[in-house]
Amino acid sequence: MLQRLITVVLCAFLTATLVPACGGKGKDSGKTASSSKGIVGTWTVDGPRFMRAAFDAQVEAGAIPAGTDFNSPEIQRRLSQFKMEMSLVVKADGTMTANGNIAGEEGSFVGTWSKDGDNRFKMTWTDNKNGEESQGHASLDNGVLMVVPDEAQTDMPAIAFVRG
């Protein structure tokens, strides 16, 4: 699953490199994709926002020492070595696709989505590599689409996407 790939790769990267450095039915009631045009389109991962969320989650989980300064030159130098690209295409017919390259690891998935309240969406996706199916949710706030798996993993940050 691409979400798990992203998390595993990023957490491994953060731990390995940063720890040493720091010691349609209606407008409001519809549950169909056609009633949710705000989410439809092409999205790209907001790498800096995701990096910050992942860093904070690793500090909270104890994998990175508390008090480590995210903005220190050494931390920023190490983070700049981590390349992250991902695009998510959400279609009006209730389907979606994603492709990504996270630190040299490629992945892709296909899935479906539906509206689940104001600016909230249910998502189901299948990893194209291993066929693993997962579910999650997304929220749209101020032009940022936050995607979170439903799995109970408290140290897994949401992935922020912006249009483009």
Image (tube, rainbow, N blue to C red):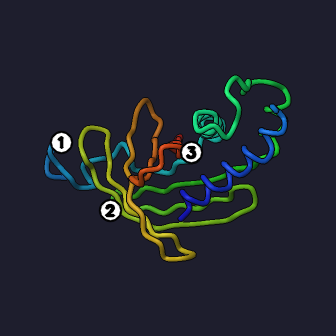
Q: Secondary structure at mark 3?
A: loop
Residue behind mark 3: 164
Percent across and percent down for residue 57 are 58, 37
C-alpha distance separating marks 2 and 1:
16 Å
Under mark 1, the amino acid is: Lys
Residue behind mark 1: 27
Under mark 2, the amino acid is: Asp
Residue behind mark 2: 93
C-alpha distance separating marks 3 and 1:
26 Å
Q: Secondary structure at mark 2?
A: loop
The reply to whether callout 3 and callout 1 are in contact (CB within 8 Å) is no
* Residue at x-position 23% and y-position 42%: 117
The foreground one among 23 and 6 is 23
Q: Earlier in the sequence, mark 3 or mark 1?
A: 1
The foreground one among 45 and 16 is 16
The foreground one among 29 and 83 is 83
Give the crowd class for mark 3: few <14, some 14-19, many >=20 residues within 10 Å. few
* Residue at x-position 23% and y-position 55%: 32
* Residue at x-position 20% and y-position 52%: 31
C-alpha distance separating marks 3 and 2:
20 Å
Percent across and percent down for residue 130 are 54, 76
In the picture, the disc for residue 14 is none
**Quadrant of the snapshot with the C terminus:** top right
Give the crowd class for mark 2: few <14, some 14-19, many >=20 residues within 10 Å. few
Q: Earlier in the sequence, mark 3 or mark 2?
A: 2
Percent across and percent down for residue 49 are 60, 35
Q: Secondary structure at mark 1?
A: loop
Judged left or right of residue 131, residue 19 is right
Under mark 3, the amino acid is: Gly
